Image (tube, helix red, strand yellow):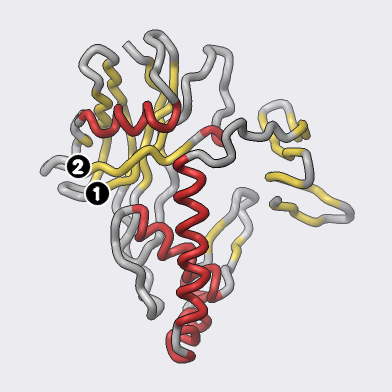
Amino acid sequence: MLVKWGSIIVKGSGKLGGHVFSSGASGASVHTLARARNPQSRNQMAVRSRFTELTQSWRDLTENERESWYDAESSFSRVNRFGDVVTLSGKNLYESLNTNRQILGLSVINMAPLPAEIPKNRVTEVEISVSTIQIEIFGDFEPSTTYVVVATPGLSNGVRFFNNSIRNIGIGPTDGAGARIPGVQTQYGNYRKQFGTPIPGTKTFVGTYSVSTSGQRSPISVVQAVFI
């Protein structure tokens, strides 16, 4: 739950108890939290396992290694959804950067790194074919660089706000020109594992985010696409 305090509360975003707080074009809103039908999905279990492993490995660090993360806190400040600067604790910074690295298949780092340049990430078009079972992503990327691919389940045409539905579905390397992530069947297979078999004519949002060598990640860039 993310809250911004004013004379009382001026903004809220996230989950609290059995409710979800959000804001959109029509203003702030709150609705009852819809619980997932399958709390033991493959994706959720992987996230929990990764968190458990990193929590344990934090305890196993040497004092010098932990101190390096405490010293790095101010170097990795970030801006939240309200535009406020947030500084993670050393432990949270360790877990955050290493989680992003693990998603790309990189090893856990014990000493805090220096901030590194985050690869550019701008998706301009997505082509999805049910018949050839491929998802191809076009945009402005770094050449020959691996990106995290994200997507939403199939959505009805009236849906505009979808951020809570975005999930990681896999990783993919860009081509040598950095113009696209080729439409390999792996991404389509990952989509089906996450959301089930897509229905032709259904819309979805597909995109990417990039991760630096230090574990910092870019904002997610997505575009609307239709299964054809």
Q: Mark 2 points at which residue?
A: 174
Q: How crowded is mark 2: few (under 14 residues within 10 Å), some or many (20 or more)?
A: many
What count of labels does the image hold?
Answer: 2
Query: Compared to 50, does 54 lie above or below?
Result: below
Which corner quadrant holds the C terminus?
A: top left
Do the residues bearing badges 1 and 2 touch, measured as CB atoms within 8 Å? yes
Taking 133 as reference, is 84 left or right?
right
Secondary structure, mark 2, is loop
Amino acid tagged 1:
Thr
Q: Residue 3, position in %: x, y?
A: 74, 52
Q: Residue 35, position in %: x, y?
A: 67, 34
Q: Determine which of the numbered discs, if any, sits on residue 86 in the image.
A: none
Q: Residue 81, position in %: x, y?
A: 60, 49
Amino acid tagged 2:
Thr
Q: How far apart are marks 1 and 2 (CA)?
A: 6 Å
Q: How crowded is mark 1: few (under 14 residues within 10 Å), some or many (20 or more)?
A: some
Q: Which of marks 1 and 2 is nearer the N terminus?
A: 1
Which residue is drawn at the image coordinates 24% and 23% (left, top)?
A: 134
Query: Compared to 202, does 208 lie above or below?
Result: below
Q: Name the residue under label 1.
A: 146
Query: Compared to 132, does 146 lie above or below?
Result: below
